[in-house]
Amino acid sequence: MRKKIYYWSFEGNEGTGKTSLSKRFADACGATWTYEPNAETEELRKLRELALTENSHMTKNGRECILLANRSIHHQMHVVPLLQSKETVVTDRSFLSGMVYARLNGVEFKSFMEMSYLHNLVTLPDAIIYCTSEKRIIVKNPNDIYDNADEETLLKIDSFFEEALEFVSLYIHTKHIKILRFQNDLSIPAEKNAERLVEFIKDKCR
């Protein structure tokens, strides 16, 4: 008997349509959707904005601690209780994105995972849907340096995602996570992509 997947995480670079896809997928599964690295208090929102501002003067470890604090608070408030109640959760991003963007700032994958455990981020997804697309459609956010990244940086992020997925498949604490790659077709509605994804998952998890 296959083990039921309760915790799905959608990952991918900016502009791949994963947010819309993850929301439609959650609707199709009757699951709770959440944007995982959310800031839960006004103070943490301000700190997160500082960490994601291009002119920030903080150290790389200081930046990652702020972002991990935001993720940890949100995770403990909104993800863990649902999983403990045996409800299905779909998150837009998870620790994998954290790994990738930390690597972009010089933090190695293993160091990031160690920092995550110190922030009590020990409940990991059962499955990761890694979204790609032939073109990018990015909604610009002036307070997020990655929404305004140049093409060279976006290509570097793509490369780091590939490296991170390989790391996850081998690392002792994460190699149990099922990884599914899905090419999102941004020329069709998100609902249709969600239908395609459901069929894709049925075939892969058969």
Image (cartoon, grey):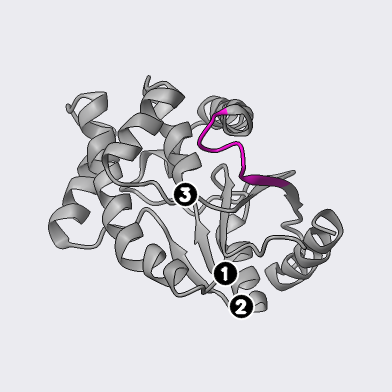
Q: Confirm or deny contact between disc 2 and disc 1 (CB under 8 A).
A: yes
Q: How many marks?
A: 3
Please name the residue shown 13% across and 55% down the image: 43
Numbered tag placed on residue 94 in the rendering: 3
Residue 98 image position (x, y, % from top left)? 42, 39
Left or right: where 143 falls relative to 58: right
Q: Whole-percent x and y of residue 122?
A: 39, 46
Mark 1 residue type? Lys
Residue at (60% x, 32% y) in the render: 158
Q: Nearer the viewer, mark 1 or mark 3?
A: 3
Who's the residue at 54% across and 31% down the image?
A: 172
| Quadrant of the rendered image containing residue 13 | top right
Q: Secondary structure at mark 3?
A: loop
- Let me know if residue 204 appears in the view: yes
Which range is magenta? 171-180
**Residue 23: image tag:** 1
Q: Residue furthest front?
A: 1
Query: Which residue is under mark 2?
Result: 27
| Residue type marked 3 | Ser
